Amino acid sequence: MARADTAKKRSGKSGRAKAKPPAVRRAWRWFWRRLLLVLMVPVVVVLLAVLAYRFVDPPTTHTMWSEKRRLGGLDHQWIGIEEVSPATVRAVVAAEDANYCLHWGFDVDAIREALEDGGTRGASTISQQTVKNVFLWQGRSWFRKALEALITPAAEAVWSKRRMLEIYLNVAEFDEGVFGIDAAAYHYFGVPPGDLSPMQGALLASVLPNPKQRSASRPTANLRKRAARIADGAATIAADGRAGCFED
């Protein structure tokens, strides 16, 4: 009987020895709460920015900031989408995301086709590109793509399609140090964006995948062919209703 009591006492002492002291438990709780707070702060900041940019124009982007530091200045002026010729707006959509009005931020069919091609071509929508330009940075890391995938639905839920496209037109890079459709129209053609012809708008849209290597005012033969296809695509989405979500 005495041996059993001794065994119980030893077992009890062993169990108490393994348990964490209250001070340690409190320290761990404090650590996890602070970690959660640190992780939540950027989430809240981004969500507040998404809400604010529904009404307020983004002051700059990471790309614009970095290019300004590198070049010493930028050519950029924010304008409303109503100040851009409709043919130019349709050309940008036809070139970058013809099904813009049909998806909620991700073009599943385009993603599937890109995967079937081995990932050799992009499938980013205008919504994804706008989120990347406004909130993130350039690059192909999986971490950035994950953040882009998380923020895009929030922006789609808060911004109208017209507002999303307006922001994109104002932050897209059209040449080295030239950002936004207003600066691009004057830079390449010397006219305000509202006076751009359908072909001029298509030429501007044709440089968007690689603005530092392409010129809308001195297009190569291949770029002219691409611009012609974009102009046809712009007319097509106007005729079949795929421009309805961003036109009055």
Image (tube, rainbow, N blue to C red):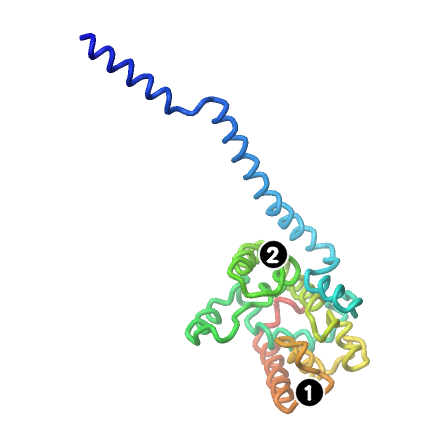
Pinpoint residue 246: horizontal percent, then vertical percent: 65, 67
Secondary structure beneath label 2: helix
Label pair 2/1, CB-CB below 8 angstroms: no
> Which quadrant holds residue 208?
bottom right
Residue type, mark 1 in image: Pro
Going from N to C along the chain, the mark reached first, 2 or 1, is 2
Pinpoint residue 229: horizontal percent, then vertical percent: 59, 85
Marks 2 and 1 sit apart, C-alpha to C-alpha, by: 34 Å
Vertical arrangement, residue 48 with respect to residue 4, above or below: below
Residue type, mark 2 in image: Ala
Q: Circle 2 sits on which residue?
A: 155
Pinpoint residue 160: horizontal percent, then vertical percent: 64, 59
Query: Seen from this angle, which residue lies furthest top?
Result: 2
Vertical arrangement, residue 6 with respect to residue 103, above or below: above
| The N terminus, quarter of image | top left
Left or right of 142 in this view: 38? right
Query: Seen from this angle, which residue lies furthest bottom?
Result: 221
- Closest to the observer, 173 or 52: 173
| Residue at x-position 78% and y-position 78% | 187
Query: How crowded is the residue under tag 2: few (<14 C-alpha within 10 Å), some, or many (20+)?
Result: many
Q: Which numbered tag is attached to residue 20? A: none
| The C terminus, quarter of image | bottom right
| Residue at x-position 70% and y-position 74% | 174
> Which quadrant holds residue 12?
top left
Vertical arrangement, residue 52 with respect to residue 240, above or below: above
Pinpoint residue 90: horizontal percent, then vertical percent: 65, 75
- Closest to the observer, 66 or 48: 66
Q: Which numbered tag is attached to residue 219? A: 1
Labels 2, 1: front one: 1
Secondary structure beneath label 1: loop
Left or right of 5 in this view: 66? right
| Residue at x-position 66% and y-position 51% | 51
